[in-house]
Amino acid sequence: MTPLNIFFLVISIAAFVVEAWAFADAVRRPAAAFAAAGKQTKPIWLLILGVATVVGLGYAFYLGGASAISILPVAAFVAAAIYLVDVRPKVREYKTGSSGSGPYGPW
């Protein structure tokens, strides 16, 4: 392997880690949080991020980063980045109903 191939392999693995993190985070969030934040629904984001994770996995481990100049891994990373930068902060603000709080604050 040449140094350039190793570089693309490392970049592909890093992109896959970001895509998997975004998918795992979306799975953990409640569906109502997406609607409350005014974003697309949870199933749509799970579909987008699931496809992005599979594409990232394919380019990082099965193709070995050899075709890293293709548009698919770039689009997959962009989808995960949009979720992490735009959707995740708004969805994290959503609080569930029973938090153990009284009428004037936490107990």
Image (cartoon, rainbow, N blue to C red):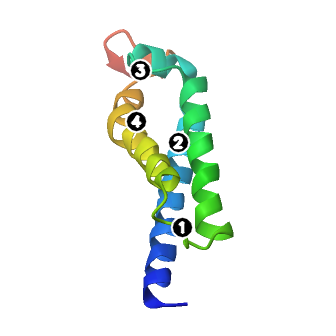
Quarter of the image where one finds residue 11? bottom left
Residue linked to disc 2: 25
Q: Are marks 4 and 3 in contact (CB under 8 Å)?
A: no
Residue linked to disc 3: 39
Residue linked to disc 1: 67
Q: Secondary structure at mark 1?
A: loop
- Label 3 and label 2: CA atoms lie apart by 15 Å
Along the line of sight, the residue nearer the viewer: 22 or 99: 22
- Which quadrant of the rendered structure holds the C terminus? top left
- Relative side of 64 to 79, left or right: right
- Which quadrant of the rendered structure holds the N terminus? bottom right
Quarter of the image where one finds residue 89? top left
Q: Secondary structure at mark 2?
A: helix
- Label 1 and label 3: CA atoms lie apart by 33 Å
- Residue type at numbered disc 4: Arg
Who comes first in sequence, dot 4 or dot 1?
1
Could you tell me residue 62's position as x and y percent?
68, 68
Who comes first in sequence, dot 3 or dot 2?
2
- Relative side of 2 to 103, left or right: right
- Residue type at numbered disc 3: Lys
